[in-house]
Image (cartoon, rainbow, N blue to C red):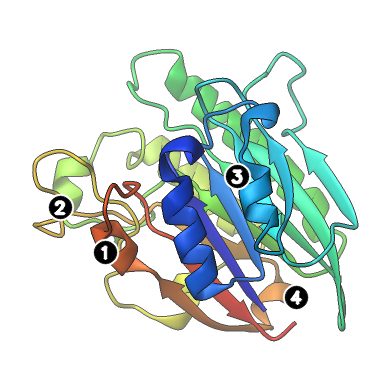
């Protein structure tokens, strides 16, 4: 089974790109971030025509997440618990039946948090604390659980072309990394780092020739429960997609599992 994440950076602007990639790669499950549309505006018909079931958690102009699956959904849940006042669409989860049982796939778009001297950074840290409680509950189920998406976090110096230049940014500063370590220490495995220690970026800014210079960072992650990590076979970063016409600034990251 192939499960992928992609920050699409506007589904209406990238629908052609997405359809080409889905037809070429045919992943079983894809989670999308930054769809930037309400549910009614999501171009589901084009995607369903390729055989995918579609579930969205949209928001006008900003944020928004979705799951596309060749498998039927057994369950769908939307939104991160813990704050009834939070209206930002940043989490969607699906449960699916496979030959080995049930798997749970949760797609997230973790807050960016910049600028750090605004209310956006405390919101990021609080969102991560809520995510920790959510993950703790999911791990207690002792089932295959894949938490993936745009985490807006650079875990280590190897995950940035110029780590010194990023230090102090909301993506790479002590408070952010502390929350990341707390999340990992709950019992999650970083899928890519479980398969390679090589440099691998997933985001290149549109500015300053970042793509041409390979000045990227790794902020799109697949995090696995022990039951999912035991089934992990490989991870692929689809770097070539960044060089396509009118790309997103992120590329798809895919895990292959023996479910």
Identity of the residue drawn at 42% across and 27% down: 113
Helix, strand or loop at label 4? It is helix
Residue, disc 2: 162
Quadrant that contains the C terminus:
bottom right
Rounded to the nearest angstrom, the CA distance separating label 2 from label 3 is: 26 Å
- Rendering quarter of residue 145: bottom right
Tell me the number on the disc at residue 66.
Answer: none
Task: Determine crowd level at label 2: few under 14, some 14-19, many 20+ residues with C-alpha closer than 10 A.
Answer: few
Q: Earlier in the sequence, mark 2 or mark 3?
A: 3
Q: Nearer the viewer, mark 4 or mark 3?
A: 3
Helix, strand or loop at label 1? It is helix
Residue, disc 4: 227
**Can residue 188 be spotted in the picture?**
no
For residue 123, side relative to residue 102 (left or right): left
Q: Is residue 40 above or below residue 55?
A: above
For residue 177, side relative to residue 209 (left or right): right
For residue 53, side relative to residue 19 (left or right): right
**Can residue 166 be spotted in the picture?**
yes
* 24 or 100: nearer the viewer: 24
- Rendering quarter of residue 115: top left
Q: Are marks 4 and 3 in contact (CB under 8 Å)?
A: no
Residue, disc 3: 108
Tell me the number on the disc at residue 158.
Answer: 1
Residue 164 image offset from top left, x and y in percent:
15, 47
């Amino acid at each position: 089974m192939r499960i992928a994440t992609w920050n699409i950076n506007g589904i209406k602007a990238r629908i052609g790109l997405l359809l080409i990639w889905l037809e070429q790669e045919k992943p079983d499950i894809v989670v999308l971030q930054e769809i930037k549309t309400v549910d009614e505006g999501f171009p589901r018909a084009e995607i369903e025509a390729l055989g995918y079931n579609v579930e969205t958690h949209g928001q006008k102009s900003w944020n928004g997440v979705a799951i596309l699956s060749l498998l039927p959904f057994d369950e769908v849940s939307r939104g991160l618990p813990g704050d009834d006042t939070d209206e930002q669409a940043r989490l969607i989860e699906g449960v699916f039946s496979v030959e080995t049982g049930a798997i749970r796939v949760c797609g997230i778009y973790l807050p960016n948090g910049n600028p750090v001297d605004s209310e956006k950074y405390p919101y990021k840290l609080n969102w991560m604390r809520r995510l920790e409680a959510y993950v703790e509950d999911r791990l207690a189920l002792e089932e295959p659980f894949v938490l993936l998406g745009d985490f807006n976090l650079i875990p280590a110096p190897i995950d940035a072309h110029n780590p010194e230049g990023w230090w102090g940014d909301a993506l790479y500063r002590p408070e952010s990394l502390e929350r990341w370590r707390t999340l990992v220490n709950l019992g999650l495995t970083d899928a890519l780092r479980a398969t390679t220690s090589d440099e691998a970026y997933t985001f290149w800014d549109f500015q300053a020739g970042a793509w041409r210079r390979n000045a990227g960072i790794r902020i799109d992650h697949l995090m696995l429960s022990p039951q999912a990590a035991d089934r992990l076979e490989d991870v692929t970063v689809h770097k070539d997609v960044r060089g396509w016409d009118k790309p997103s600034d992120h590329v798809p990251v895919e895990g292959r599992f023996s479910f």
